[in-house]
Every structure is written in C-alpha cells, then in structure tokens.
Amino acid sequence: MKFKILFLLLAIIISCENGGNEGRNGDTSEDKTTQAGTFESAVEPISAADSIRLSSYYKVYVRRGDKWKEMVVRDALCSDANKHRAIWNDWDNSKALRDTMSYCIFEDDFSGPVEVLVEKLDGQAKDVRVRPTLWEITPEIKTDGRIAFTIPSYEHRKVSVEFDGDRQHNLFLFPVRPDGDKPTESSYGTKYYGPGEHHEGKVTLHEGETLYIDYGAILYAEVQVVGNDCTVAGHGVLCGDDLRHYGDQYSNGAIILNCNPGRPGVLKNLLIKDITIINGPSWNVSVYNYDGVTIDGVNAICWELNGDGIDIVCSKNVEIKNCFLRNYDDCITLKVRFNAKPESDLSDVHIHHNLIWNDYARGIVIGPEAGNRDYSSGYIHDVLVEDCIILQHKAGRALDDLRAGFAIGQYASPDNSWGGGTAERIEMITARNLVFDNIDVSGRNVALWQYPDMDGICFMRHITLENFTILNENKVFTPAIYVQANQHSLNGLHLKNIMMDGKRITARGDSLVIHGDVTFDIE
C-alpha cells in the first residue's frame, strides 16, 4: 500500500512539473522535438516549388502547432562600408566591396507571439543578438546549435539577427500577416504574379491598375507607374538581377520602381505596400511629382551607390511607414530636384515606424537637394519624422559631411549639372521619438549641414529635434549631433530631451557640436 501511495505522489509531481513548461501551444520546443524523436521529424519542409535560390547561410523555422515549418531564406548582396575609402561603384566586385546577407519573408496570422528557430549553416555562433535592442528579444543558443527566440507581437515583427557582432552577414526577418484581400490572376485591372519566378523585362502600370506580386513570387523586372490611382503590392520580391548594373562612378542602371518617370504633370494616389526589393541597379523607389502617396511595409536591400531606398521628389501628402530598408546610399530622402516637372514644393510628409540600416551615406535625410532660387521657388517644408529606429550607420567620419543616421542637408539642385545657384529654404521640420540603436563606431547619429559651395546665403528655419534615444555601446567617436551652417543661416533649432547613454545632452560640448550662424535652444 505504501508503495502505491509513493508511486501516485511521484506521478502527480511529474505531471505538475510537465504542466509548468508550456509554451505558445501548450509545450516547449525542446519537449516536442524530443517527443518526435528527432528535430527533422518535427519539421514540415519547404516545397520543391519554393526551393528557388535558397540561402547558403541560414535556415529558418517557425512554430506551426506541434510542428516546425521551414521557411524560405534567400541571400542578397549588401555593401561593406568598412572597405570603402571613397565613393565608387564596383560592378564586377573586383575591389571586394560587397558582402552577402540573408532575408526571410514568411506569413503568420500573429494571433499570439511567434516562436522562431534559426539554423546557421556555416558554423556555430558564440553570441547572437536580435535587434532592435529596445524590443528586448532574447535569443537562446540551443544544445544543437540552433537559435531560438520569440517575436512578441506584430508591431515588433521585423528584426535583424546578428551573429558574433557581424553586421555584414546577418539575417533579416520580414514577417507579414496573410493578405485576405489579395487579387487573383483574373482580377480586373490587375497584373498578377503568383508563386515562382517571372522574367518580364518591364512592367508598366496605367490609370487605375494594380501590380500584385504574391507570396512566394519573384518578379525580375523594371516597373514603371505612369497613371493615377495605381497600386504596387504583395508579399513577393521585386528583383533587379536581370537588369543591367553599370555606370562610371555613379550608377546608370534603371530605377527598379519608377513612379511618374516621364513627368507630364502631377499624378495622384499611389500605394506601394509590403513588397520586398532586392538588388536594384539604381534608386529602388522613385516618386516624382505626386499628390497622395502611401508607402507601407516595403523592405529593401541594395548594395550599390545610387541605390537609394525611397526618393520622394517635389511631391506632397506623402506617408512612409513600417518599412525596413538597408541601402548603401540614402534609405529615405526628400528632395526638390532640377529634373522635376514642375520643380515644386516637397511638403506634408509623414515618415514613421520605419527600421533604417544605412551602410555608407544617410538613413533618413531631408534634402540635400533643396531646390534652386535661380530656377524656381520650390522648397521643402512641413515634414514630420517620428518613431523610427536607426539600426546602423557607417562612415560618418568623412567630412563631406552630411552622412548620418538622421540628417537635414541643404544644397542647390542645379540645372542638369552639379554646382551653381543657391538652395531654397527648408522650414517646419520635426523629428521626434527616434532611436539610434548602437550604430557602428565609424558612424554618426545626427547631422545638419548647409553646404558651403553655393552662390548666396540659404536658410533653414524652425527645426525641432526631440525625444531622441542614442544607444552607444560601440562608443561612436563623432558627436551625437553635428550642426554646420558654414556661411548660411539656421534660425530656430529646438532641441529637447536628447538622451545619450541614459544622460540628457543639455549644452554644447563633445556630444553637441554647432558651427556657424545658428540660433538654437536646448532643454
């Protein structure tokens, strides 16, 4: 009888202990893997149709009930700014200025936190980080070498996974909820591309048309939008591998998503949503002379000079949100430029909740091409940038110098050639709630720069920077905020609650450097 009682008590204790180890679906990954016998037997592999250009460096698995589903991971070229000593392109990689990173797009309904496993195929890592840092996602290196972590919410879904401090060969995750409203191949006015590879050369959207690149699709094409009320959307990839990458110092390749290329006038109502752009041969997204633009959830990875992420030129009523951009050149840039038709204002722009990774030039930059008083009155005004995270910036040591994670620059946009004239004014710019997440030691967090080589005096007015959080474990040696007016005028620079390493910047000094005719206040 005593043995039976002891046996029952032991069974109860074991049951209670097992019940305390529940994960999202009532069990832990290690328990389920053990129950299945081997990890491989608990995995739903990717289909043969999805096995297109798979990554040589990583595998990614996502929890699906009591199994793991392997997701498609692909590689992408990125720029290695550590090797750059000047601005140049390297078309055949003879100078070895490129590296290879990886990315994974997967769909999940995000009804709760999402469990992820990452397998590194070229050796085990000793240290793993999942950034943004403030999202507090803590990875665990399992005994089999796989890395486990949980994406806590849909709002914090896009992340960079980095191994042993290596930011050149990292892994981006681009999760997204399934699109319940996506069109089909037979939908009116829709150019639909389903799962698989599609080599199209060029795709043109006219009035009211939609380009839809579905989940699992790779569209190799240059896309031009020439009409009002157009949409480019989907969870697939727009890839520039088929397009010619060429030039001299600067790229002469095609703009992979070119909106209003002929510029016969102002177009209206453009939506670009959720697509991923890889290996564009020039600017990735070009938007000229538009009224009403929404760019939502776009991802981009681009290695080359002139490979800007998103360029908005002489447009108004623009919103850019939820994007994850890695570019050698500017990630997001707002311009009044000589080849706009008309060379009108850039205004009423809202940039928010974006992740920015800049390998050499600028993360988010207002300017530097800021119109030209000799040719038009178009100027930059009424811009709000908020709730963005700068994950990386490099090469801030160069004394160009507008290179920074966040920047405002003022330079005269010439008439078809660089040099000459005076930039129009820039005014009513607010940037708030920005996080600079341990950028590279060679980088710069914030720069405001009025270029010296202009014919007359140009003006910036009413610039507000507030609630900046600068994480600085890499000990960046450039000032946190660098302002250079040269011979020009910056009137009304308002600085509020600028925090670096947990300490508020309250005065000029090593962290705040200001040169020239600048009227400012700080609190």
Image (spheres, rainbow, N blue to C red):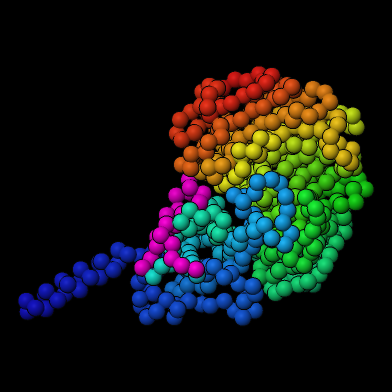
Q: Where 300 sits versus 3, above or below?
A: above
Q: Is residue 113 visible?
A: no
Between residues 299 and 209, which one lies in front from this camera angle?
Answer: 299
Q: Residue at x 67, y 57 (%)?
A: 95
Q: Residue at x 17, y 72 (%)?
A: 10
Residue 273 location, quadrant: bottom right
Q: Where does residue 164 sit, x and y in percent of width and height? A: 46, 56
Of residues 24 and 215, the one nearer the viewer is: 215
Q: Residue 514's image quarter? A: top right
437 sits left or right of 291 in the view? left
Residue interval drawn in magenta: 122-143
- Describe residue 464's horizontal placement relative to residue 439 as left or right: right
Coordinates of residue 199 in the picture (x, y in percent):
78, 71
- One can see residue 185 in this view: yes
510 vs 342, left or right, is: left
Residue at 89 percent of width and 38 percent of height:
415
> In the current view of this chain or complex, which residue is farthest to the right?
264
- Say which quadrant the N terminus sits in: bottom left
Q: Is residue 522 inside the magenta stretch?
A: no
**Could you tell me which quadrant the C terminus lies in?**
top right
Residue 230 pos. (x, y %): 81, 56
Q: Quadrant of residue 42?
A: bottom left
Depicted 366 relative to depicted 175: above or below: above
Residue furthest to the left: 2
Q: Which residue is rendered at x = 56% and y = 32% of the image?
A: 479
Q: Is residue 378 left or right of residue 111?
A: right
Q: Is 134 covered by the magenta stretch? A: yes
- How many labels were placed on the picture? 0
- Percent x, y of residue 350: 69, 40
